[in-house]
Amino acid sequence: MGETTVTRLERMVGSPLSTDVGLEIGPRDAPLLHKPHHNVRYVDYAPTEIIKASQFDPSVKIENIVDVDIVWGDVRLRSTVGEPVDYVVASHVIEHVPDLIGWLIEIAEVLRPGGTLGLAIPDKRFTFDALRQVSTLSQAVEAYLLRSKQPSLRQVFDTAALGVAIDLAEAWEGRLDPSARRSEVLSRLQPALQLATSLHESPRYNDAHCWVFTPASFLDLVEEFATLGLFPFMIADLEPTRRGALEFLVRLERPGSASDDAIFMSIEMARSRLASAPGVEAGREEAEKAEAERGKVEREHRTALEQARLEIHHLKTQIAALEASTSWKITAPLRKMGRVLRRKS
């Protein structure tokens, strides 16, 4: 295992010992944890054969996909895992799960007290989700109450319509202009509708980015989950998106007997780390400046248009008043005669 992978893994879950028991969710062809060096079992939504057969990403090497040990399908995860584990790791998985709240709760159920969940999460500002809105509490609550097992039609449509390829450097430099991608988005609407219609008429699993985050929006969302009593974790660490990267890392810990206050305090501490990380989110300032400049231009344009509308309205009012005046009516024959003479000349 290379140094880069080790460092990233350590940032996500610490340093798993060979005696620690863990799970890796959705490893596909690039697991972070390797047997037999780690006592790990691989978890996915379907058996290995189906995972291999359903791959559409050309970057995934089918022959390297690891064997799935635990299928997390319609049954609760704890019923298939057995004894509690020391850690769970999931890299670029959380955004795909249909029921975000239920997923987190079920993982907490299989962790021992003090156990950790390590997450690598795409930062939407630097991925193909850049044009999409961040996910909201109401969307997560709806999926939780419905016990969603597959991406919703809205999520599939949103991914298909707005999931456009972007240049990472351009995004970091604040040069990503959503308005410049408008025609591309419009060209994707019809195929997106056709896909959603097909899934509505013949329901089946269609992968999508169900959830869209920035580090800040993730913290806001889990704070709202905690307020509802639906976030069974403390935030042990949050590493903001590093310059030139497209993901942020989060380490969650299942508390033993921690109070709700401790959970909220851990969220605030993570928010403070996010706000005080110099240069970690470099590019954000440039992006905000560019956005502010675009907003200024748009406001000036709207102001000019509104001023033009007011002037046109004023002229129309003056013309209407003039046409209704007595002098206008008296001089009407003279204006008519003038038009006749001009045509004859």
Image: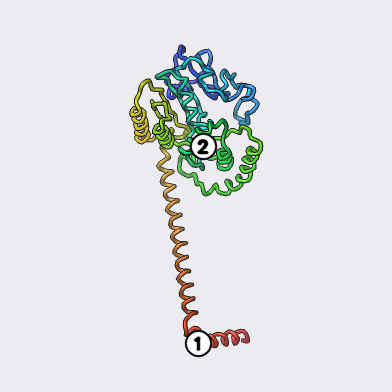
Residue labelled with disc 2: 127
Kind of residue at disc 1? Ile
**Residue type for callout 2:** Thr
In this view, the residue in front, 342 or 85, is: 85
Q: Nearer the viewer, residue 216 or 7?
A: 216
| Residue 293 circle label | none
Q: In the drawing, does residue 98 fall left or right of residue 221?
A: right
Q: Secondary structure at mark 2?
A: loop
- Indicate whether 136 appears above or below 257: below
Q: Residue at x 65, y 26 (%)?
A: 53
- The local crowd at label 2, few if under 14, some if 14 to 19, many if 20 or more residues have their Cα within 10 Å, is some
**For residue 24, above or below residue 57:** above
Residue 203, percent from left and from top: 63, 35
Q: Position of residue 247 (x, y in %)?
A: 47, 32
Instruction: Give left or right: position of 173 versus 63.
Output: left
What residue is rendered at 63% in x and 33% in y? 204
Q: Quadrant of residue 156?
A: top right
**Does residue 163 appear in the picture of this structure?**
no
Q: How many discs mark residues in the rendered view?
A: 2
Q: Residue at x 46, y 39 (%)?
A: 172
Quarter that holds the C terminus: bottom right
Q: Position of residue 322 (x, y in %)?
A: 47, 79
Residue 302 versus residue 16 in the image, above or below = below
Disc 1 secondary structure class:
helix
Which of these two is toward me, 268 or 215? 268
Q: Earlier in the sequence, mark 1 or mark 2?
A: 2
Q: Are marks 1 and 2 in contact (CB under 8 Å)?
A: no
- Mark 1 — residue? 330
Q: Position of residue 123 (x, y in %)?
A: 47, 35
Label 1: how many residues lie within 10 Å, few (<14), some (14-19) or many (20+)? few
- Residue at the front extreme? 145
Q: Marks 1 and 2, how far apart in space?
A: 71 Å
